[in-house]
Amino acid sequence: MSIFALCAMLLDDHISMAQRHVRHGELHIARQHERITRLRSKSLPTTDALSFLNLLEEVHAAQRRRLSQLLSKSAGSQAASEVSAAETRLVKGATDLIWIPDPIVRLTLELEQELKARMKWLAAKPPKGRLH
């Protein structure tokens, strides 16, 4: 198998994964909108749900940008398969197997902190004399 066939296979795998992430992101956003609608219909607070929706939308936008980058690389890889052997040696050292955009890392860390804070809040005992 040539290095270009291997790179194309890895790129195809990344594209498939990115497409899956975009589809799942759309489902999560739709579900969050439904949750917010239910909260509003019961006159319950929606501040936290809206903040979480904002995070989901930011992550989704970053995932769509990444998919777009991968698709443009894929279009360029067809032309790359016709390069000379000298250019092939340059590609052999490529290490772009897994690339996570900085905004996704930042949002993931923020989401992790937010979820940890929520879990602590849920695990805390309710104060005496108050009903929840």
Image (spheres, helix red, strand yellow):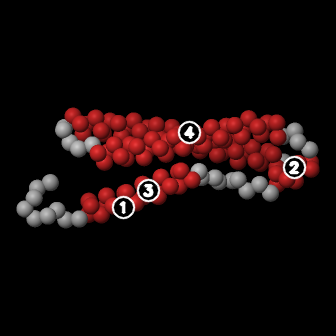
Mark linked to residue 116? 1
Amino acid type at image mark 4: Arg
Amino acid type at image mark 2: Thr
Amino acid type at image mark 3: Glu
Q: Nearer the viewer, mark 2 or mark 3?
A: 3
Q: Is residue 31 left or right of residue 125?
A: right
Mark linked to residue 88? 2
User: Which residue is denoted by mark 4 in the rendering?
Assistant: 64
Contact (Cβ within 8 Å) of mark 2 with mark 1: no
Residue 14 lies, in percent from the top left, at 64, 46
Q: Earlier in the sequence, mark 4 or mark 1?
A: 4
Q: Nearer the viewer, mark 3 or mark 4?
A: 3
Q: Is residue 1 visible?
A: no
> Which residue: 92% across, 50% down?
86
Q: CA distance from mark 1 to mark 3?
A: 10 Å
User: Which residue is denoted by mark 3 in the rendering?
Assistant: 110
> Which residue: 39% across, 35% down?
30
Residue 52 lies, in percent from the top left, at 37, 47
Q: Secondary structure at mark 4?
A: helix
Classed neighbour count for the residue bearing mark 3: other residues with Cα under 10 Å, few (<14), some (14–19), many (≥20): few
Q: CA distance from mark 3 to mark 4?
A: 19 Å
